[in-house]
Image (cartoon, rainbow, N blue to C red):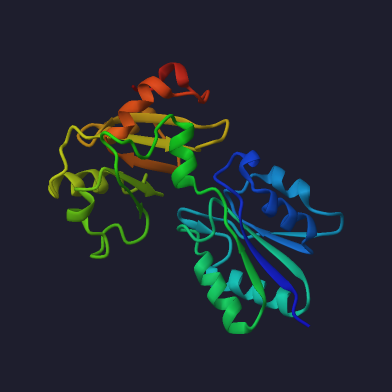
Amino acid sequence: MSGMVYLVGAGPGDPGLLTLKGRDCIERADVVVYDALVDKRLLEHMRPGAEAIYAGKREGYHSRPQEEINAILVFRGRIGQVVTRLKGGDPFVFGRGGEEAVALAAAGVPFEVVPGVSAGIAVPAYAGIPLTHREFGPDVTFVTGHEGCDGARVRWDVLAGVSTVVFFMGLTNLPRIASRLVAAGRAPATPVAVISYGTTDRQETVTGTLATIVDEVARRIVDPPALVVVGEVVRMRESIRWFAELGAARACV
């Protein structure tokens, strides 16, 4: 008899941003399969006797390939267990939750998607950057900055005309992102923010422009995970920053 698999978004880092439904799924699970960026305090919601399986991925290192993670979810569901797949941010926003859902559907294992607070929304908010603004930020686009950043799938000419662009996992490719946007017509003076460990007590934000951000980040030695925000809305951080950051006294503004 098949069990049930919950694909749960754990939020971007702050454990308080987990949804109530997400917490309920952790509490009822026989097994929780969790990612690297999930705050370990969320595992305290597990019931006694439940099993935790680490399936984290960080740049350059995957503890388990995606195919193995899919197989774990399918197998555990098929033997009748309640499985909570706990993923950072939202499972369907650059979280490969779609791949896991396809695998479960193909295997006939019941599943449910529990959306989470996406890092693309929460991290800029914690850095004091609203993604939209009526005067100079009427549209926003989310892009993967890690996989496919070099490929034809990324329309740099289109991104150059978007008010606000948010790159997930964009730290390694930051020089390429900045140069490609400028080459596509974006002004070199366009403000940029790189936010590391967003929504956590390790959060740090470095700001600059497309022309200067690479040097600013190198000078500050920023570590992943990091989100990159490009657009005039970054300027608003100067007046509405509210979250106490690591190294806030030396933050670039």
| Residue 53, image x, y percentages | 70, 60
Residue sitting nearer the eye, 89 or 36: 89
Can residue 225 be seen from the camera position used here? no
Q: Quadrant of the N terminus?
A: bottom right
Q: Is residue 118 left or right of residue 15?
A: left
Quadrant in the rendering for residue 230: top left
Q: Is residue 4 above or below residue 216?
A: below
In the image as oriented, which residue stretches furthest toward the right? 48
Residue sitting nearer the eye, 54 or 23: 23
| Residue 51, image x, y percentages | 78, 60
What residue is shown at x 86% (from left), y 58% (from top)?
49
What residue is shown at x 38% (from left), y 26% (from top)?
237
What residue is shown at x 56% (from left), y 35% (from top)?
200
Q: Is residue 96 left or right of residue 129?
A: right
Q: Is residue 123 above or below residue 170?
A: above
What residue is shown at x 56% (from left), y 72% (from top)?
101
In the image as oriented, which residue stretches furthest toward the front? 134
In the image as oriented, which residue stretches furthest toward the top? 249
Quadrant in the rendering for residue 4: bottom right
Can residue 112 be seen from the camera position used here? yes
Q: Is residue 133 left or right of residue 91?
A: left
| Residue 62, image x, y percentages | 53, 60
Q: Quadrant of the C terminus?
A: top left
